[in-house]
Amino acid sequence: MRSPAYKQWRTGVESVKGCLQPVRLVGKWEVRHLGSGDLIASRQGKVWASCGTRRAAVCPTCADRYAADAWHLIHAGMSGGKGVPETVARSTRLFVTLTAPSFGAVHNRPGKRPCSCGRWHPDGYPLLGSPITPDSYDYTGAVLWQAHSGKLWHRFTIALRRAAAAAGGLTVRASGAHLRISYAKVAEYQRRGLVHFHAVIRVDGPAGPDSPPPAWLTPDVLADAVRSAASSVRVDTTRPDDTPLPLGWGAQVDVKDITATDIDVADNAGDDEDQAVADNRLAGYIAKYATKGTEATETGDRRIRSQTHIDLLTVSDHHRAMIQAAWDLGGLDQYADLKLRHWAHMLGFRGHFLTKSRIYSTTFKRLRAERQAHQLRTALTDAGLPEDTAVLVVNDWQILGIGYDTPEQLELAAAIGDRIRAARQTRKEPE
């Protein structure tokens, strides 16, 4: 640790904020004036780049960055900013949770009542979420529902637009001249290994975020449309023996009105600040789930390679059974298009953890482009040039390696990353 090599290594770790799977590169980076070709700034040698994963189980540091971007994406669609007009803060909005149906009774903590098994379970009880009678639990149905949950969501959005149009006495085609529905949705694993979908659903006018929604589409009317759409959606598939298996949403559909009150900011600044705090918290609540994995393994949700791999996993019996079911179903020709073996480590879930409709807000690509543009402006300022100087950026890098060479290096990098993250959280606390 006293050697110059360690100092260089530590500088690399700190440059990626303690990333646990850094990409080590060698090459050069140049910024040249587009007109004259003169060199403005350059860097060459070895550099480290963050892995960029969204999964906290793989890399907490990069997951923090992903969650921060997710917060901006979701929050912009609720309160404006990042190219979205602030008028969206007054649009009709709901926070909706769609759940998976039951495939068998599981151990839980229902509150004022004991679990279905007749006992009271404390927090952290190891069997929470696992079947009360594993032999009768429908693992095949659970995995197939999970594999089709993305299609269920797609059909739900179509049914929602139809239900909202019908509430106004309109056809779907005609409704385009009156309203547009957008959303941001994130998937969250439950203890039983199945996903919930949490979504912010917003109604705008026909021109999108720049126009107000129709007055008749109140939060109550939209909530009724959500419930109607959720109950009507179905995806048909079959079990391995060709028995029909209709798939739909669970009976529990949670709908909360998060529409901001139409207040005069000048006279009710305190109320407006309360609304902003509520939007901030809700955006953070949704964004944090975007970094979660299945929490079924201690391997960071890495793909399953073989039956032996499944046998050696350090997992609960319930999650092992779901992984096994996905692996077995993935070996059947009738489910080849689902690629269940490819997604066995995700318990059959094949969708994206965070998705949004096109007009809801900004994109991850734009957020990353903003950071790159900021770095470029900094380089121009350091060179004494105007920020709007036309330049050509040249990157030429080759990979030297990924991750760390020894377990000791990984452990030390993790400690450095924890310290950096703790310091960042401390700076945020006063705010």
Image (cartoon, rainbow, N blue to C red):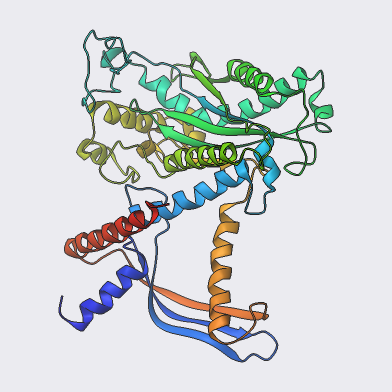
Instruction: Specify whether 336 is left or right of 132.
Output: right
Residue 20: percent from left, percent from top: 30, 59
Instruction: Specify whether 254 is left or right of 143.
Output: right
Residue lying at 56% horizontally and 53% vertically, measured from the top left: 364
Q: Nearer the viewer, residue 248 or 375?
A: 375
> How many dots with numbers?
0
Residue 379: percent from left, percent from top: 54, 80
Position of residue 304 relative to residue 191, above or below, is below
Q: Nearer the viewer, residue 413 or 132?
A: 413
Quadrant of the rendered image containing residue 227: top right
Quadrant of the rendered image containing residue 303: top left
Q: Nearer the viewer, residue 347 or 113?
A: 113
Residue 1: percent from left, percent from top: 15, 75
Residue lying at 33% horizontally and 55% vertically, measured from the top left: 426
Position of residue 163 relative to residue 421, above or below, is above
Instruction: Specify whether 295 is left or right of 258.
Output: left
